[in-house]
Amino acid sequence: MFVARRLSMSSLQYAIQKASEIPYRRGFQRHYCIILDKRGRKLAESANSYSKTSPKMLRAARKVGNDQAIYWHAECKAIYSLRNPEKAYKLIVVRIDAKNQPVNSAPCIICSTLMKSIGIKVVEHTV
Ligand SMILES: [Zn+2]
């Protein structure tokens, strides 16, 4: 039954499901991002991370004058894991609260800038 439901899930539902699989910790946000091509095929996906720092993340942050962001944002991590960034068309990013309910996940300036630089056309986020 779980598998059957999952196959018919929308991309948004899938992202929320994946975010809810991240163990909840007080004070830590749970984001999940997926990137799709024009036909809706999933090209990349990622959660955010509070344990993994990345020089790529910091480089993206510095482009917009931020020297603090060293932990992966879900969107940046998904973008950097793309094998063919030119095929990326749509990005979906979600955030859920302690009760697994969707809450605002509007991308920050760092992630937005990186999205624009690779030519992502459509961004959807939870509100
Ligand atoms: Zn961000």
Image (tube, helix red, strand yellow):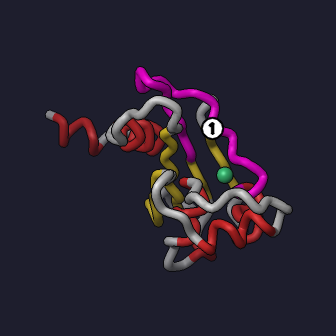
105 and 28: which one is in front? 28
Q: How many labels, in total? A: 1
Q: Position of residue 27 (x, y in %)?
A: 52, 32
Q: Is residue 84 above or below residue 17?
A: below
Farthest residue in the left direction?
1
At a point 76% along the width and 70% down the height, the residue shown is: 117
51 and 82: which one is in front? 51
Q: Is residue 70 above or below residue 87?
A: above
Secondary structure of residue under mark 1: loop
Label 1 crowd (10 A; few <14 / some 14-19 / many >=20): some
Q: Is residue 98 above or below residue 3?
A: above
Farthest residue in the right direction?
65
108 and 85: which one is in front? 108
Instruction: Please state if 126 lies on the left or on the right of 83 as rendered.
Output: right
**Quarter occupied by residue 116:** bottom right
At a point 62% along the width and 73% down the height, the residue shown is: 56
Q: Position of residue 8 (x, y in %)?
A: 31, 40
Q: Position of residue 66 (x, y in %)?
A: 79, 59
Instruction: Please state if 124 lies on the left or on the right of 11 as rendered.
Output: right
At a point 48% along the width and 62% down the height, the residue shown is: 52
Three-letter amino acid code of the residue under disc 1: Ser
Magenta span contains residue 95: yes
58 and 4: which one is in front? 58
Q: Position of residue 123 (x, y in %)?
A: 66, 49
Look at the image and tell me in which quarter the N terminus lies.
top left
Magenta span contains residue 96: yes
At a point 52% along the width and 72% down the height, the residue shown is: 82
CB of mark 1 near ligand 1 (< 8 Å): no
Look at the image and tell me in which quarter the C terminus lies.
top right
Residue carrying label 1? 105
Magenta range is 93-111
